[in-house]
Image (spheres, rainbow, N blue to C red):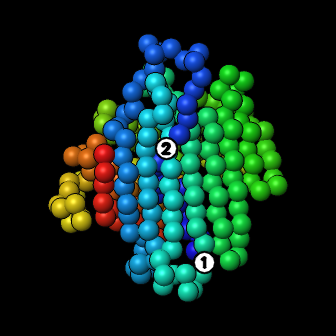
Amino acid sequence: MTLSLRTAVLVASLLLGCSVAQADADPLPVSPFRARFEVYGSGIPIGEAVMTLAATGPGTYQMRSEVRPNALATLLVSGQIDEQVRGEIRAEVIRPTHYERRMETSKKKQTVQLQFDWAANRLEARDNEAHASLPLTPGVLDPLSLNLRVMADLRRGHLADQYSLADETEIKSYQINNEGEETLDTSLGKLRAVRISQSKPGKTRITRFWFAPDLQYLPVRIAQHKDGKELLRMEIRALDR
C-alpha cells in the first residue's frame, strides 16, 4: 500500500543530554496525544493510522506515525509506513534533529533518513542509497514536524504563507492557504475545523487538513487530491491525551 503520508501525520522521541538547561527549554505547543485514524483510498477503507506526540524531556519532542493496511487491503497489497522524528523547541522555534521514514510494499522498499545539524547548518539526507549534504537554513522542517509547526502557528494566529520542507534528498517549498472554517461530523462529535491546503507551486496534488481549535488544532481529517480526484483520506476515530 503506497500512501503518501508525509503531509498527513504528526507524532513523536528525542531526549537531549544534560547540557540542556531547564530555563532554555520551551514546552510543547500542544499537549501530548495519541490519535487513531481510519484511512481511505479512493473512498474505500484500507487501513488505520496511529499518530502520537510525546514530550521526551525539557523542550524536546518525539512524533510518530504508523500506517497499517486492514485485512481487505492486505489481500490486495501488503505494506506499511512508519515515520518518526526527534526534535527540540527553543524560543518557540521547532527544530527537528533526526527524522526517519520506512516504507515497505510489494513493489517498493524505501528508507529515508534526515539528520539536522543546526550547529553546522548542514542537513545530511539519505533515500535508500542516495545521499545529499545540503545547506540548512532556519525554518526547515521534516514532514512530521511540519504538522506540529502548523498547529502551533494556528494557535498563535500567525500562519505562514509558505514552509520549507526537507524530504528524501531535497528541500522543497510548500504553499499554505487558509480556506476558512467548517463543521465536521466525526467520531468525536461535531467539531469546528479550520481547513488548510498544502501544495507545491506548479503541481496539481493538494493536501488538505482540517484542524480543530477545540482540540488544540489537532488535525481531525486529512485528504489528498490530484487533478480534483481524492486519492487518500484520513478520518479521526479516537483521541487520548
- Does residue 231 appear in this view? no
Q: Give the residue pinned by disc 1.
A: 78
Q: Nearer the viewer, residue 198 or 99?
A: 99
Left or right, 185 with respect to 81, comes to left
Q: Give the residue pinned by disc 2.
A: 12
- Does residue 66 appear in this view? yes
In the rendered image, which quarter is residue 239 located in? bottom left
From the top left corner, tell me how far across and down residue 169 is, in percent.
72, 49
Amino acid at pointer 1:
Ser
Spot the residue most to the left: 190
Q: Judging from the image, what secondary structure is the residue with disc 2 in?
A: loop
From the top left corner, tell me how far across and down residue 155 is, in percent.
30, 36
Spot the residue most to the front: 18
Nearest to N terminus: mark 2 or mark 1: 2
Left or right, 210 with respect to 53, comes to left
Question: Height in image: 205 above or below 7?
Answer: below
Residue appearing at x 46%, y 73% in the figure: 47
